[in-house]
Amino acid sequence: MLDFPRWKVWLIGIVIAIGVLLSIPTLIAKSPLAGQWPKWLPDYTISWGLDLAGGSHLLMEADTPDLQKQRLQGMQDSVETELRHDPAIQFGDMSTAGGKLSFLVRDPTQVDATVERMRNLTKPVALTGNRDWDVQVVDSTRVVLSPTASGTADAMKQAMSVARDVVRRRIDPTGTKEITVQTEGNNRVLVEVPGVENPEALKKLIGQTARLEFKLVDLSANPADVKAGRAPPGSEVLPMADGTGAIAVKRRVMVSGDQISKAQQSFDENGRPDIALTFDSAGARRFGRATQENVGKPFAIILDGKVLSYPVIEGPILGGSASINGNFTVQSANDLAVSLNSGKLPVKLNFIEERTISAELGKDSIHKGAIASVVSVIAVIIFMLVTYGRFGVYATIALIVNAFLILGIMALFNATLTLPGIAGFILTIGAAVDANVLINERIREEIRRGRRLIDAVETGYHEAFRAIFDANVTHVISASIMAYFGSGPVRGFAVVLLIGVVTSVFTAVYFTRMLVALWIRRARPRELHI
Amino acid sequence: MKLLKLVPEGTNLDFMRWRTVALVISTLLTIASISYTVYRGLNLGIDFVGGELVRVEFAQPVPTDQIRGQVDALCGCEAGITTLGNDRTYQIRLPKPAGPQSASDAMVSKLRVVIPQEHPGARVDSGEAVSGKVSEELADSSALAIALAMLGIAVYIWFRFEWQFGVGALLTLAHDISMTLGFFAFTQLPVDLNVVAAFLTILGYSLNDTVVIYDRIREDLRKYRRMAILPLINVSLNETLARTVVTSITVLIALGILLLIGPEVIRGLAIAIFLGVLIGTYSSIYISAPVLVWLGVKPDSFLRTEDKDSAQPETA
């Protein structure tokens, strides 16, 4: 017991010094001292959870049917282009019913050649050994392309990674804000923006797919058919964005938003907000050619499947710039410009969870949480002192050191402190004392049994440790499960519990043992007052 | 200075004398808790059933009926309105809309606009919307987490002690969880994600107590080989009683303060853990320990097999 080598004392002292040092930047973060912290010292701080700092937490899920529809449409375009290259293949009755693309090959001798061409359109999916589409022949002349599960999953994965970047660019075009944008699971994006109290603007900004397309209006369509939602072959019926009916447009895209190099909110000649677009060189060529070939015809400007407007092409537009109108306000035109600049979302995102906390509520929680923490630490300390005297003092020192260590380690890993985390902190204080209670009660017991002082202390620490260890393992098990399954705030609670388990074993067992050993060595007490 | 000794020296309570009575009461209470929970149901928060929750702080007191009228007219539904502590802070709960999630967003969004218009100076402090899909997942993963934690802890105890101890731990945990559930069903306090965190903490804490007692029983089994199991458990319980009392009081002090002056957002969590600590302390004495007797733990349970042959079967 008295055998406590100097290097161990130093080691424990250094660990504690580092812990305290690491915790200071967090403690002074909100005070005027914050700027005075020397630059050469480590400057780690904990992050505040949204429930304390205030802010918005938005969870979005990709619209899987939308992605499937897009893939199907993309495939249809490639198939049509591919088959037009080969005049020998005559095809018809193309359909996308049931999520599959199928068509008839008129000349039965060409079926094999067609299938060969279709196979070449499919791509292998990495790591799976499957291709992204299945090509089959049904009833000897109908070729059917169906998306495979691994193909869909792969497309979703790629779409999500693009979506994450697009969302980030939209919220934070300059890349300077402290926001979290990450993919969750297979088809979700989580956005956390501190300090935002009204997420509506944010939601408008990221909720818009911003798929901009220019298509020719199909003038051959029968108005009665359009009303009933039927379009001639090669065309489709799209609703107007302002809800004033629908029009038929050609399926073929003249130019798409992908070919825009810059979008900017501006005003038209009547002073109404519009958006000025600049195409990239390929886009400018396409737009120039399309307008040249279709002078006098109306073309539709389509955003996310809705027609904004369909002006008549008055003359070829060759300069590579255009402007779009559509009953915008300055704000909505600005949002759309940001969205167009950041690129379109590869798939529509739906909001499935939203949590927004105001900074005031957060401040109130921090304030009450801090007071409760301080009061409970003081109450526990008083209880320890009246129960265990000198050993209570040691337990108290251990408790305070423990609090610094928890903060320091959290700061080191830049962990997030949430409101339940504060509760976890208080609980850890209560539970950390348990180790000292176990030890001290055991020492009392051993003294009652007539052991000599040093022997009693030694046995107390030794025998109590088994139970302390096992009890802490059970805490680790439940806290790890919480950390794994829990979301945001609950995970913050688990993190504090986990760190607290480790630090409290260190402070309550090793650190107090050192204090006791040093005291016995120095004072050589004859009896123990415990 | 005279030190505080909550449990006087030489305390020797005959805990096991009441074990049958305690068992009957515990079993009845557990059954009552489970059946009441099933019958009445828990007041599940939007985390688990979906819906919207808006917290508003008004500049001056506003009657509940006035808010109810305004909100109901706005959403065309029946909103749940509760005050939080005073007549200026209200929590408005709206059901999950039948349609797509975008509809549900619209309600929170509308309230954010309308409330400050109708009540100058009012502030929307928090707005949450959870879709049916997310809430189902949260409910599933919470249930899974609690079940996994129970199993994981029981398996660890089995591994560190003997199988009887593992079973005892599992029964103790099941008891604690069903009693706490019963409490939440009875009081209809809202159950949200924080309460699930509390349940997981109760599991860890309750076992903390049980482990301390089991550790002592194991030690005493090795020490007093000739003692019968019942008196031996009594000895172990009395030896650890001082620690049980002091630790429980410490944790209850810390939590009690959190409950009284802490932020009300985590009140549910604090109540659950406070209660769990009380139940856990009781169950570690009257569930964990007697189970060992019924499962036939004997003084030679911790001897290796070759030692068992030489150990004499003794009755004391």
Image: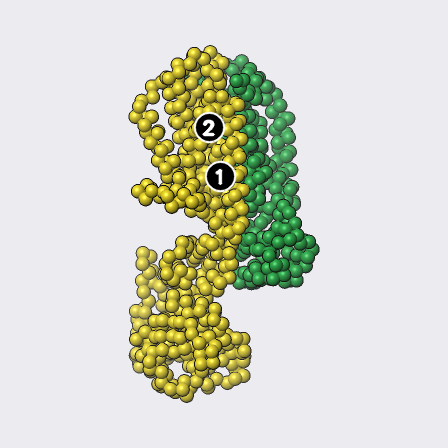
Chain colours: A yellow, B green
Along the horizontal axis of the image, is B2 left or right of A297?
Answer: right
Do the residues indicated by labels 1 and 2 lie within the same chain of the protein? yes
Out of B240 and B34, give the one closest to the viewer.
Answer: B240
Secondary-structure class at tag 2:
helix
How crowded is the residue under tag 2: few (<14 C-alpha within 10 Å), some, or many (20+)?
many
Tell me: residue B19, above or below residue B315. Answer: below
Residue at mark 1 to residue at mark 2: CA–CA distance: 19 Å
Secondary-structure class at tag 1:
helix
Tell me: residue A285, above or below residue A28. Answer: below
Residue type at mark 2?
Thr
**x, y percent for residue B65:** 69, 55
Dividing the picture into quarters, in which one does residue A312 lie? bottom left
**x, y percent for residue A396:** 46, 28
Which residue is labeled 1 in the image?
A424
Tell me: residue B278, above or below residue B96. Answer: above
Out of B255 and B241, give the one closest to the viewer.
Answer: B255
Q: Residue at x 37, y 39 (%)?
A: A22
Along the horizontal axis of the image, is A4 left or right of B122?
Answer: left
How crowded is the residue under tag 1: few (<14 C-alpha within 10 Å), some, or many (20+)?
many
The answer to whether residue B11 is seen in the rendering is yes
Residue type at mark 1?
Gly
